[in-house]
Every structure is written in C-alpha cells, then in structure tokens.
Amino acid sequence: MTKKKKSEERGFEPYVMTPEEALAFLDRKGIKYEICDTPVPVLGNKVNCGVPLDSGEQMIEEYYYLPKSVVGLNPVVDIPTQGDSMIEADIHEGDLLRLEIGAVARDGDIVLAEIDGECTAKVFFIDDQRQKWLLPRNKDYDPILLSADKETRISGVVRSIVKKTPRLSFSECAAIVNRARSKKRQEGDAIQRLSKAMKDGCPLFWAASAWAVAYCVVRDCCGYEESMKEFERKAMNMTLPMNFKFVCTMGTVQRTISNHPYMRKPIDKWKENGASTREIVLAGYLRNFLL
C-alpha cells in the first residue's frame, strides 16, 4: 500500500506545532503571551467549602507552571475543593483555589482559614462593630464569627478559581457534528429553492439590491444563518436565466441592508417601518415559494 493511500485511510490529521513554531505564530499574529516558568504546587488535600474539616498534613500531588507576573512575590498553591458552601461564588466541588500564601486579607476576599485546626474557605469580612466573620456563599450555611475563644489563622487569599475542564463524550461530539451537517443540508436546500424562485420570478427583480430582500426572506423563513458575504458568494454561483438582468455582486446585500435599517427586522415588520411596495411584493412572492 502506498504512503498516499495509507494517509487517505487514516483521514486528515492536523499538524501539531512545535513550541518554537507556536511562539513564532503568536508573534506573527501580535498576540501577547508570557512564558510559564514558575512552578505552582497542587496540593492533594481538599479544602472544605462547607463545615470546617481537619486541615491535616498537606501533600503536594503535582506541579504546573505559571508566569512570574501571575505568581507575584508570595508563594502560590492550588488546592482542590469539596462541599457546597461557596457555590454562589461559583466555587464547586473539584475546582482548584489558587491561593496566595501569606497575603493580607481585605473585606470581601475569599480566604483559606484554619479554625481550631480545621480548614475552610470562606469570605473574610469585618463589620461596623469591628467583629471579624467568615461568610459562606450559600444561604443554607451560617456565617462564622471569629471570637477570641477560637484559634484562627488565615493561610492566604484566593486570587482565582481554576475550573475543571470537562471532556465531551464521543456521542456528545457526534451529536454536535450531526446537527451542523443537518443544518448545512437545510441551508443548501434553501439556496436551491431560492434559485428556482429566481428563475420563475425574475420579472420581480428591479435592481441588484433586490438580492438583499432575497437574503432576508431566506434568513427569516428558512433559518439561514450564513453571513451576508457567504450568501452573496452562493447567489453569484446560481444558474439564472439568460434574460436575468440583475445578478448579485459582492457587497450588494451588505450595502443595501446597511442603508435600509428595517431590513434588519423580520420581514413581516417591513411595511410598518417604511419598506417600498416592490420590496413587499418580492418578499411575499419568495416567502410563499420557500415555505
């Protein structure tokens, strides 16, 4: 079997850039980036977002890297979460809290606190009586008043939340592709029917700008979602009668709709917004043909 046939059997395989090629690509595109060269440990122990739990011995599970500008001067660690007391802050079980160790907490900061040897993540707050609180972000939990009889230490301030990245199943991916293919077929059918409508109704076309009416009808009646530019390309490739005077050209549809704001509205709203009689007649003819 030839090399070409083997490649065809495998199907198209995207080329993966080397790190050097990827950086050169970003430079060419003017995309700003920072090199991630500062290690950040991920702790294996979970911090509780509910009732405080024993903090236990912190074990480093792995490291990953961030830019120095992100990490800053204080050490940064990522800690996985469990519990539901912070769900209104969009912190859910399994998320990572990116914690700046030793940072000074201010009102409203989410902090990692240790209370009598038990660890929890909450919002730090000082009220008008100078009392300090740890506040949950779930109405089913009560705030914790930090009184003198509690040994409380704040380990650091949460600077960001790293969300879990879900991986789609094969069936979910296939469903998205199948919907896209079905939509393409429907759009193709709409263009074919429009082509036939043009042949039968060419006397109703009074100028090239009438193609804007055709685009709006296909958009509103056939669920056509391609861009105006793509519609113009397809219209230019239609096989039309020899006596059809007003063929579509690039930019015609876009210019016409820009100059006629009512065309951005559904076609059944055109008449009350100032559309001309010939536009209403052509829209009605095409609508009846396509539906």
Image (cartoon, rainbow, N blue to C red):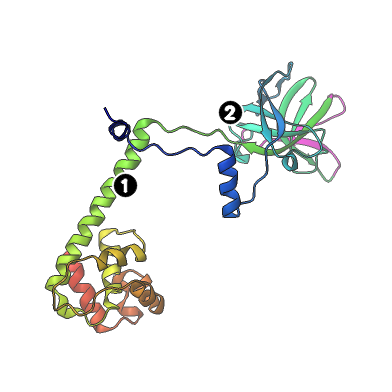
Q: To which quarter of the image does residue 259 belong?
A: bottom left
- Measured as percent of width and height from the top left, residue 93 is found at 58, 29
Residue furthest toward the front?
2
- Measured as percent of width and height from the top left, residue 45 is found at 67, 20
Which segment is the magenta one?
129-151
Q: Is residue 258 above or below residue 174?
A: below
Q: Is residue 235 above or below residue 133?
A: below
Name the quarter where the C terminus is drawn. bottom left
Q: Is residue 141 visible?
A: no
Q: Is residue 21 visible?
A: yes
- Three-letter residue code for mark 1: Ala
The residue at 59%/47% (across/down) is 24
Q: Which residue is mark 2?
A: 94
- Measured as percent of width and height from the top left, residue 155 is found at 79, 29
Residue furthest toward the left?
200
- Measured as percent of width and height from the top left, residue 144 is found at 75, 31
Q: Nearer the viewer, residue 87 or 63?
A: 63
Crowdedness near tag 2: few (<14), some (14–19) or many (≥20) residues, C-alpha within 10 Å: some
Upstream in sequence: badge 1 or badge 2: 2
Q: Which residue is mark 1?
A: 180
Name the quarter where the N terminus is drawn. top left
Q: CA distance from mark 1 to mark 2?
A: 32 Å
Q: Is residue 133 magenta?
A: yes
Give the side of residue 65 with respect to residue 281, left or right: right
Q: Is residue 33 magenta?
A: no
Crowdedness near tag 1: few (<14), some (14–19) or many (≥20) residues, C-alpha within 10 Å: few
- Three-letter residue code for mark 2: Gly
SS assignment at label 2: loop
The residue at 74%/16% (across/down) is 57
The prevailing secondary structure element of the residues shown in magenta is: loop
